[in-house]
Each structure stands twice: as structure tokens, then as C-alpha cells.
Image (tube, coloured by chain):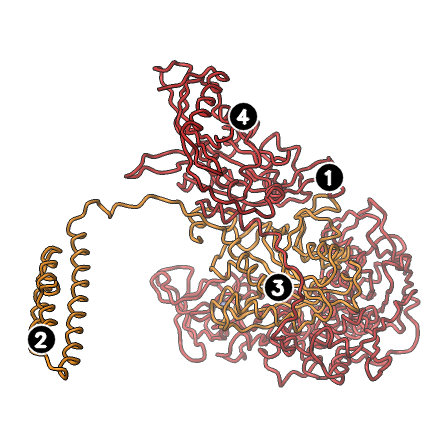
Amino acid sequence: MIISVQWLKNYIDISDIDIDTLCRSLIMAGLEVEEITSQDAIYKHIVIGYVEEKIKHPNANKLSLCTVFDGKERRKVVCGAPNVEAGQVIVLALPGAIIPDGKFEIKIAKIRGEESSGMICSRKELGLSDDHSGIWVLPGDTKIGISLAEYLEKTDTVLEIGITPNRPDALSHIGVARDVAALFNKELLKPQLKAAASGNEIDSHITIEIEDAVNCPRYSAKVVKDVTVGDSPKWLKRAIESIGLRSINNVVDVTNFILHETGQPLHAFDLDKISGNKIVVKQAESGSNFVTLDSKSRDLDNQCLMIRDAEKAVAIGGIMGGENSEITRDTKNILIESAYFNPSSIRRSAKKLGISSDASYRFERGVDYENTLYSAERAAELIAEVAGGKIVSGCIDIYPNPIPDKIVTLRFARVQSILGYPIDAKQITEILRNLGMSWIEAAADSVTVSIPGFRPDIEREIDLIEEIARIYGYDNIPPIQAMTLPLIPIFDETAILDVIRGFWSGIGFNEIISNSLQRTKIEEEKPKAIATLNPQSADMVDLRTSLLPGLLTTIAKNISVGEKNLRFYEIGKIFIKKNPVIASFDDFDEKHILGVAITGLAGEKQWYSKESAFNFFDLKGVIKAFLSKISLDNLSNDCYNHNGNYLFSYLFSRFVNSQLLFTGGKVRKEVLSLYNIEQDVFYAEFNIEKIEQGTPVQKKFKEPLKYPRITRDAAFVVEKEIESEAIIELVQKQNLKFCKAMHLFDLFENDSIGETKKSLAYSIEFYDETKTLTDAEVEEEFIQIIGLIKAAFAAELRG
Amino acid sequence: MEHKILEIRAAYKSEINQAASLKQLDEVRIKFLSRNGSVSALFEEMKTLTKEQKPLAGKELNALRNFCESLFIAKKEEIEAQSSIVAPKIDLSLPGVNYPVGSRHILTRTLDEIKSIFKSYGFSVSGGPELESDFNNFEALNFQADHPARDMQDTFFVTKDFLLRTHTSPVQIRLMQNNKPPIRAIMPGKVYRNEAVSSRSYCLFHQVEGLYVDKHVTFAELKGTLVAFAKEFYGSNLKYRFRPSYFPFTEPSAEMDITCFICGGKGCRVCKNSGWLEVLGCGMVDPNVFVKIGYDPEEITGYAFGMGIERTAMLKYGITDIRTFFDNDIRFLNQFK
Ligand SMILES: [Zn+2]
């Protein structure tokens, strides 16, 4: 919202407060001054000058070369306007000036070989009108050398203030002045109305009827007759323009002036265009439409509140007036509407119609329902003052169910128990008075006040405490240097994530964070995806069902900048639809997932090693290390799937307590091509909830082995189909007394052992926790194992 | 005697200095320090001195022996060090074997820093769902339907009643529904805002909120806690201010600003020439929230606060485009290990 400091001075004496202090105080009271603009800033280096001489430009037909006196010195200025003549008083932009229309800077320059050190401006270039017929020629008696700002009397300072939605009272100059009054303990000077003429002539001009008193609780009106619609006087025009509005005519300008003075939106109708001398406030009919002031046709529904005359709608209540009853230069008689509309009704309609007007913005936040008549009368006075005409005696004020007074009791002790700092009772009452609260009852330890209509946000004791703190100054409440610490157990639900990140970042992976909103590209995932109703773009329509797409997008992006060897992980939520309609938390799953992807080279070519590409066993190996880190390595075995699924060409997975812990494998080419990736990607996805559930709460210490381990190696030639792990599992199942472990250390395939065969070499480990084994004991089990493997897999012992 | 000691000392020093190899060094050692060496000879000679002369001579002889021994050790180390430079066996300048160095995302790191400070103040850490009900995200937090306060947070809806949470405040509701005061926790997580993606806003960001609910919790304590945090996180010299603001779920509500550390408060582009940076929002939990939960607001008070991690990291590390965080360019990720 824009506040003119000059305008503000009508309601409060701030002659002893400089702008910086004023702004700082407003900010510290919750009215955030976002920008301070001195009006003259845009006219910097623009002055009034006098054309002493004009000759033709020697090198250009359409240009003139002028000698201009700027009050201090004579300058050569090249001018292209046809109407420039010697003897004119003109507006001269000096080097350094920024031309308001177009925002370009004036510099000393050579134009067709002639130096020009300034520019003679048109009204359009100065942003003052659309007239670009030629330079702006000022009256001959204008003082030479003064600044344009001074000439235009634009020496005001304008504040842009961000007003939070709870403070509709501050959406006007009087509202801001009220806060200033409270902050500096000054008097608010609200304009007094003149004594009204007695009589009720208004009744012969108009009757008003509210059919929907819920959405329009109050409707006040005044009539002014025989006005002359025309340009606004200078003071009104300047006020209107100072806050960035365009002056339209004296009547409309007055309604805008009152809106920004009191915060009450007004609407002025051309009374002669109101049929049947009658106004009715009622709901629109669904499916009807209405042409608003801006010449747009609006589709209405039965939630829109309409202002109608005997025949037709003339305005959308509280949102925008109609073209059919607007004030024109021919208007003679005026009906001023000053109403209070229900905030949520206005909000619904404004949203529905896609209109946000100065009026609807204020109505939906809540205007002062006690102020409607005052504003109507003030408007009538001002219209009579600036547009002539006569105020018709009497007023209309329909208020069938007056809004009850809000009465709130404030206990002084409660102020301290919330703020943690004592504020003097005297100071509390002073603040409340300055903010416009009226006294109902004062006791030793409390005060009961009635809340004015302009503060819809204040209803409870806590609201008053906030007001007191706000005006007293948050910074005047000293922070407590010690804190009370309840002795309760501290928990950290994110602790497991630290462990996970510690492992993956520690082993060389980069953590990424990708967008959880995306377009589901993988066909099979589409039925699982939950869509947002109002996406930003088609690329961000769905909630992700997997971390794979985010990782693939990231991989593709990095490959495109030449980074091809990547180890990434991400921790994040995925969302899976369980039922077609989301009506409760049971209709979808939100899972916490760890996604891991590797692609490109595991190691580039080095002096000590050859280049090696990532493969499935890199993924498998790092997962094994991770499972060991989180103590889930010994609970169950991996399952292998050679055929894969729609995501993986082949994959492996592991279950803990029959629940899926992870799935990982080689990502299918078809999936990669959706993301334009040509190199292999290996990906695994962990369910973090299962990691947490599976991890043993506490490990028990185990005595390290005191007796030697003995290893024996054996290589077997078997058919290629036989899986290495099957052989190990077979031996494990025997539960032999001394054989405790077995691992593959060599794989050999060569025609020399047969085209369909491979050789698997194992190292087999024997020990006993209570004694040193003898050769004979080891030998016995070793032979047993060899026999077992030979028999079960048609294996031959090699070498 | 005294004269001899000085003579031997000088001779030893010069011979040691001339020794160029371990072998030569050892020869010097034998000549002076072995059983038959000249130093030992002096010890023999001492026996011939008078009772009065002995103590002084003994002291000097011991000093000589210590001097010789320490010089020998120093020289030996020098020769050994030199010999390894002179005669390399392997090219030690070859690059070492590569080990990849991973990274935590800068947002995680920033969050971890904030988390550890609040944990040290006795706050727990709690999480909650991102896909929330309208009740938990808005209604329970005193956002009334059809109130302009809802415009403060543009929302992605999934249905009329389910949405992507716009702040982590619903976790406050969940915590209070499931626990009795005292409750003291921070709640980090992703939140979503339906805003056009640009350098300044993204459709999602990360937030940390905090909540302390108990008897006798006050605004002054809220200020104290946040000032302590800001000084630890941003630097102990900072200036701060609390100014009134509005959040439907707190009252009084405030925003905390700190002096712009980019311009030192003089005013720059980042602080929009105000000299101040807004770093967090806070306030006393609104009694309406307690009533919705089922607490007695006469008995229980509390404070809540919240801050955006992206904004915090952007300020702290001078990142100007919020999309940088979600592009995950490895050249960016690798800058913060
Ligand atoms: Zn700054």
C-alpha cells in the first residue's frame, strides 16, 4: 500500500519527526516500509530552461540547434521537435538525468556532428501525459532554473508499506496515522464533518433495500445533486497521483481519496441511470452476466452479491461497479454508496471472478462497519466542494442487525506471563487508548475495553497483548539470557538419516536433492502417481513415485556438461496411490526412500590401473558394505532376478522379516532413453523405514577368536548355469562343526575346461572357538565338503 | 684439564661437521666416544685430580659428553634424510591412488548445523508427512477458510482436503496431539509453495520450525533462545531486531532481522537497501491452536519459530539463484564437502 507523507500530515502532526525515524518506527510496529521514494527523485537533473536562440542544424534538415539557459549556464542542445522556438520556457533534462518515459540517461553526445548537452522534453517523455506532439512549452513567467519537481510541486515522499492480512485498519492514511499517534503518543486529527442540513430529501430520490443482510450487513448512502463533473482541483489531483493512481474526474477522484483516507471503499452511481429510484442488494442469478466498469463481461453465480435497481444490476457489490451506471462528464446527480460487505463473501466472489480491486481487497479483509456513514457524508462534502452541486439532506443507513460490540478484558498480569516482562499498567492503558479502544471498566488488575469497528483482528485478550507489545516495541522487551530446560528425553527422528548420509558421502557419493514434483514418464508408474490439481507446469504435475527419475534427470544434466562418471544418492519421500480417490491418509503411502545411482567409470585410466566402467558388482559391493554399516548384512540373503522388470534389465533384492529392504540392478535402456541417457546406469532404492525397523537396537559384544583359522582352497569345474552362491549355501546348510565361512576368490572360463563350463575357486575357512584344530580335523571336513559339492553339482575338482 | 676439554670439543665439532656418510660418522664416534676414545680418556684423567678440582671437572666432562652425543644424533638424522633424497628407490612423486570424496548436499549441511545448535539447547528432532490434510496444514493452525491469510501460502492441492504442506507447522500439530507438554522440538523438512519457478522462488523448499510448549514459556525466552541461536549460527557480533508480523498460528508474531552481513548494514542489493536481512519468523503459539489440540491456554503457553534453509544457505554462501540447489550440478555439489 502507498502512503504519501504529505497527505498523512493532514491527520497527524509529524513536523518534529524525520522520515527515517518515521519509517523505522512504522517498521518496528509491524507496518513494514518496503520502499521510500522521494517524488523528486525521478526528476533529478531536470530543470526549467529558456531557449535563447534557435538555428538550423548544419547537417540535418529536421533538427534544430538551440542555445538554452538553464539558470546557471548556456548549453547547446540539439532538438528534433518541430515546435521549438527561441523565447520559449521549456523543460530541460541535463546530463545525468534519467528520462521518466523510457528510462534512458541523458549524456553529452554528438548528434550529427554537433555537441548536445541536454534534452528539451515533451510531456510524454516526462511521463506526464500521452501527448507527444512536441516539446512542452511552459508559461513565459515561469522561473528559470528551478527544478521540474519544484515546478510540479512534487516534493512529497511516498512510502510503500507491506500490510499483513490481519491489519485492514492500516490500509488507509488515517489508519497509518493512528499507529503513528500511538507510537509517538500524539493526537489523531480525524476530519470533522460539517453540520448537516436537516430534512430527509434523500427519500424522494432513492430507496434502498437489503435482501441479503448476511452478506451485506450495512448500506449507507448520500445523494449530491447538480454537480459539474470535470477535472479535479490541483490538491486532489496531486493527492491521487502521489499514491500512483490516475486522476479521472473530480467525483471519482473524491471516492478514491476517501478510500485511501479512511479505508472505506465507496461507489458513486450516476443517479439518473438508476431505474425506479431504487437499490436492492441481493444475490445474482446463476448463469447471468454483467459488464463491469472496465468493459469486461463477467459470468456470475448465485454467490455473487449484486447491487440492482428496479430493472437491472448496476454493480457487483464490493468488487466493481457497472458500465451502465458509471459517472461520466454529463452526470448531474450522484448516489454515493458506502457499505459493509461480509469479508468471506467478497473473497469468494472476487476469487471466482478473478478480480482484485482496491475495494475488494479491503472488503475481504474487513472494513470499519462503524464508519460507513461517516465516509459517505465526508464524500458528499468533498464532492460538493470540488464539483459544486448541493448535498441532498438526510442520509440512508440500512443496518438491520447491528454487529454487537466486542468487549475484551485484559488482565495486567497476563501481559507479563505472555511477554515475560512487566509493562506498567499506566503505559498499557495509554497504548490502548491511543489505538482507539474505548473504556468499559477499569479495575486495579485489569481493564475492559470495547474494540472499535476498524480492528476486526482484535477479539481476545491475547490480541490486546500483541497490540501492547507492538506499540511498546518488541525491542524494548529484553531477551532472557537463560532458558528453562525441561528434563525430558530428547529424541532425533532424523538420526538414521545421519548414519545413511555419513556412509554414502563417506564412501564417495554426492548427495543430491531433486524436485519431488515431476511428470511421470515411465508408463508402468503412471497408475501409482498422485497428481496435483493446480500444477505450475505440465512438467511438475505428479508427486514422484520413485527417486529414480530425479536421479536420472540429474545424471542427464551432468552428462550434458561433460561430467559422466557419477556416484549419486538422494534421500526423500515418494508417494504411492493406493486407492483411486484420496480421501484419507489410508488411500496413499508416503515412503521415505534412499536412492543410489552409479554411472560411467568407476576409475579413469591411471598410471597404476586401467580404466574400468561401473558394473553390477560395483553396486552389489557398495550395497554389501552399506548393509554391514547398518548391521543388516547377516539377517537374510539376496534374491536374484535375471529377467528384471520394467525398470531393471536384471536385479537383486533383499527382504528383512519378509519386507522389502531394497531393490537394485541395471536400469533398462528403454527407461534411460526417456531421459536421453546412453551410458549404463545402476540403481538401487532402499526403504528407510525398513532400515530403521531392521537395525538391532543394541549389539552384544562377541569375544574375538583366540585360536587360529585354517583355510583350504579348492577349485571346482561346473556347468556355467550353476550359481556360485548356490554352492556356498549348500555348504552352509550342512552346519558343519568347524567350517565357518567360504568365499569365491577366482572365476575362470576357458575352452580348455569346456565351452559350457567354468571353474570356481573357493577359500574355505575352519576354526573352533574353544581350541586349536588339528590337521586331521580340518582334513576330514574338507574332504566331506568336496564330496558334497561334487555330488550336488556334478563338479570336478580342478588342479 | 679445562683447556683439553675445549680442544676436544672443537676437534669433535669440526670432524662431525665433515662427516658425509654414516660410516664416517661412526668413525668419529669411535674416535671420541668409545671406551678408548678421547672423551673417555679425559674421564680417566679426572681420577688424578685433587678432591677440590673433581666436582667442577666432572660437571664439565659430563657437559662435553652430552654435547658430543646430541651433535652425533643430529648429524646422523641429517645424513639419513639426505641420503634418501639423493638416492630414490621409487618415484614418490607419482600421484597417489584415487579415492573418491563424496559430499552432503549444502542444504543438508546447513540443516545439520542448525539441528546441532538446537539439539545442544535440548530440542528433539521430529519429522512428518509432506502430503498433509487441510486440517493439519491450515485449520488446526488457525487459518480460517476464506481468509486472506491463506493467500500468504500458495498451495498445491491434491484434492479439496489434501495438499502438499506449505510449512512444517503441521508437525507441531502432530507432536502436540501425540504428546503432553513439555514439548521441545525442531521440525525440519520439505515444504511446497505453488509459485512460478525463478531465481528467487522454487516450487519447494526446506524449512526448520521449532516449538516449545510448557508452563511459563514467554516471549522474552523466545527472544533469548533465537538471539543465542543467531549469534552461534551467523556470528557473535551481529545486531538483530524483532519486528511485529503476522502468522495465524502465533500471537504475538514477530520476524527476526539481523544486520546484513554482506554490506554491514549500509544497504545493498541483497538486503534491498534496508541494511537488514529477515532470517526467521516466530511468535507465541496462538491460544486457538491450543484449544484445537485440547490444551488449556490459561495453563500452557509456548513459542514457535521457523526459517527457510535455502534462504539461509543462500545468504551464508552467497548463492544467488535458488534453482542451483536443485540442479545438482556435480561441480556445485563438490564445492561443499
Ligand atoms: Zn546489505
Give percent across and percent down for residue A517.
60, 43
Q: Which mark is residue B122?
A: 3
- Between residue A727 and residue B299, name the one nearer to us: A727
- Which element type, helix, strand or loop, lies under badge 4? loop
Mark 2–mark 4 Cα distance, whole angstroms, equals 83 Å
Q: Nearer the viewer, mark 2 or mark 1?
A: 2
Chain whose colour in the figure is red: A
Chain label for disc 3: B
Mark 3–mark 1 Cα distance, whole angstroms, equals 36 Å
Type of the residue with mark 2: Leu
Q: Which mark is residue A587?
A: 1
Position of A297 compared to A58: left or right? right
**Mark 3 neighbour density, 10 Å: few (under 14) some (14–19) many (20 or more):** some
Per the rendering, the colour in which chain B appears is orange
Chain label for disc 2: B
User: Can residue A176 be seen from the camera position used here?
Assistant: yes
- Between residue A763 and residue B95, name the one nearer to us: A763
Position of A480 compared to A783: left or right? right
Quadrant of image for the C terminus of chain A: top left
Mark 4–mark 1 Cα distance, whole angstroms, equals 47 Å
Q: Is mark 1 within 8 Å of ligand 1?
A: no
User: Can residue B13 be seen from the camera position used here?
Assistant: no
Give percent across and percent down for residue A219.
86, 65
> Which residue was labeled with disc 4?
A734
* Residue at 54%, 42% in the rendered image: A631
Mark 3–mark 4 Cα distance, whole angstroms, equals 53 Å
